[in-house]
Image: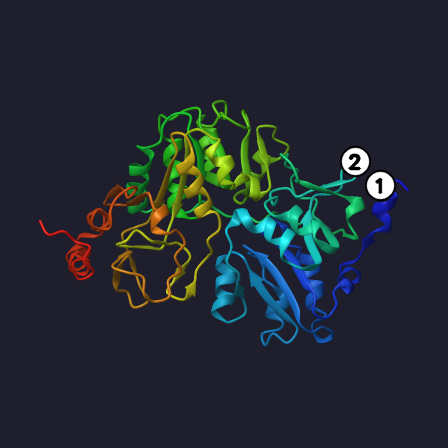
Amino acid sequence: MSIFDEYRAKLRTPDEAVRAVKNGDWVELGYCNGFPVQLEEALAKRKKELTDIKLRGYLLFNPLRTIEADPDSEAFTYYSWFLSSYERKLWEQGLCHFSPMLFRNLPEYYRRYLNVNVAMLTVTPMDRHGYFNFSVNCASAKAVLDCADIVILEVNEAMPVVYGGHDECIHISEVEMVVEGAVRPMLQVPSSESSDADKMIADYIVKHISNGANIQLGIGSLPDTVGRMIAKSDLRDLGIHTEMLSNSFLEMYKEGKITNKLKSINKQKGVFGFALGSKELYEWVTENPSLVTCPIDYVNSPAVLSSLDNMVSVNNCIAVDLYGQVCAESSGIRQISGTGGQLDFLTGAFDSNGGNAFICMTSTYKNKEGELKSRIMPTFTNGDIITDPRSQAFNLVTEYGLVNLAGKNVRERAELLISIAHPDFRESLVAAAEHQKIWKKK
C-alpha cells in the first residue's frame, strides 16, 4: 500500500473520528495553532453520550466548545499546563484546572507518567514522503503523540511548514485517523503596546546586552518592548534561542540585528520551541533554512543553554518579595499563567559563558478598587506561587533601576530591592524589612 493509499484509508469526518473517545479517556488537545477546532467541536456534540472525559492542553485561545457546552462538568473536565487569557476566564469559573510544570520537563512527563488515550492535533498537509509537519507547534507535540493510544490529525492547509532540528513531524504510519477541513486562518497575536515604564525598564536591560548575544524573550509587553528596543539599537550579530518566537524577533531580524553567525552551537540557525504572533511572523518561519523548531526539552534544557555563549534571557513577573523570591504565575491563589520556561532560562543563562538573566516588572499595579500597590512586597503570604526561588534570582529590573542579587545576603537583597521600588512604598518596605530583621540601619 502506498502512503497515499494509506492516507485515503485513514480519512474520517470529524464526527467519525471522535467516536474513538470512550468514557474515562484522557484526550489531548494540543496548544495555540495546534488546537484541533473541528475535532473538539465534534467531541462537544457527544456530551450526552460520554462521562469522565479528561481534556488536556495549554495556551488555548479558541473557545472550548466541550467545556462551554458542559458547565457542570458532567462529561468533560479541562486541565491546562499554562493559562492563556481565555483559559484564565475558565479557571475563574471553575472550568479549568491547572497543572504545574517546568516546560523543559513536559515531554518527559508524558513519556514517564501520563496516560494519553486519544491525541488530537492540527498539522500541515501530508508531504510526498508521508510526513505531517507540526508547523509552529513543535514544543511537546511528538512526545504527546508517541505515547498516545490513538492519534488523530486535523489537517489545516494554512499551516506553514517549519524546518526542525528533530521531532518536528509525524509519519502517516504512526497515525490512526486523519481529518481534512477548510483552510483555517492561523491564530494571530499582535505585539503588545509599550508603556513609558516598559520603555524605561527595557532601556536598563538593553544596556547590559552585548554584540553576539543569544536572545530569549518571554511572553508579555515587557519582553516585547526589550525586543523592539534591541531592533532600534546598535547591537549586531545576535542569535535566537527562545522558547517562544514572537513578533519582536521579526522586528530585530528586519533591522539586521539577527545573523546567528556567532552562535557556539546551532550556527546560522535561530532555534525556537513554538511561534505565536502575526501573519508576517508565520510567513517568515515558513520553510526558512535559518530558523528551526525543536522540542522544548532541547530548547529549554539548561545543558543546551549553557553551551551557548552569551545567552541572554528576559522574562517578566508579577511580584518579588524582599528575600528575592519571584512570583510570575499567580496573584495570591488566583492562577494567572504558569511557570513555563522562566526557571529553565534563568538556570541556563546563568550557566552560560557570559550569559545573563533578567526578570522585569513595573514597580506598581492597580487593584480592582483602583488602589496603587507595590509589586515589591515584604513577604509572600497570600498563597502566591513562588516561580523562581531566591537562590535563582539574579537581575531584577523596574522603571527605577536594575539590581543584581547574585551572591547578596538577605540584608543586601532587601536594600537593593527597596532601591528599585516605587518611592511611595519605600518607607513602608524599610519598616517591614526592620520587622523581618533583614535591614541594616545606617
Q: Is residue 206 left or right of residue 265?
A: left
Quarter holding residue 163: top right
Tell me if label 1 and label 2 are in contact, CB under 8 Å: yes
User: In terms of secondary structure, where does tag 2 sit?
Assistant: loop
In the image, 191 versus 230, the foreground residue is 230
Q: How is the image coloured?
A: rainbow
Query: In the image, is residue 214 above or below residue 91?
Result: above
**Residue 209, numbered circle:** none
Label 1 is placed on what type of residue? Ile
How far apart marks 1 and 2 lie (CA) works out to: 8 Å
Query: In the image, is residue 415 above or below residue 90?
Result: above
Q: Residue at x 64, y 70 (%)?
A: 76
In percent of width and height, residue 113 lies at: 62, 57
The residue under label 2 is 129
In percent of width and height, residue 38 lies at: 70, 58
* Between discs 1 and 2, the one toward the N terminus: 1
Q: Is residue 371 left or right of residue 130?
A: left
* Label 2 crowd bin: few (<14), some (14–19), many (20+), radius 10 Å: few
**Residue projecting furthest to the left:** 442
User: In terms of secondary structure, where does tag 1 sit?
Assistant: helix
Label 2 is placed on what type of residue? His
In the image, 30 versus 45, the foreground residue is 30
Quarter holding residue 329: bottom left
User: Does the image show residue 279?
Assistant: no
Q: Residue at x 37, y 31 (%)?
A: 232
In percent of width and height, residue 86 lies at: 51, 60
Q: Residue at x 54, y 57 (%)?
A: 81
**Residue 3, numbered circle:** 1
In percent of width and height, residue 85 lies at: 48, 58
Q: Is residue 99 left or right of residue 310?
A: right
User: Does the image show residue 385?
Assistant: yes
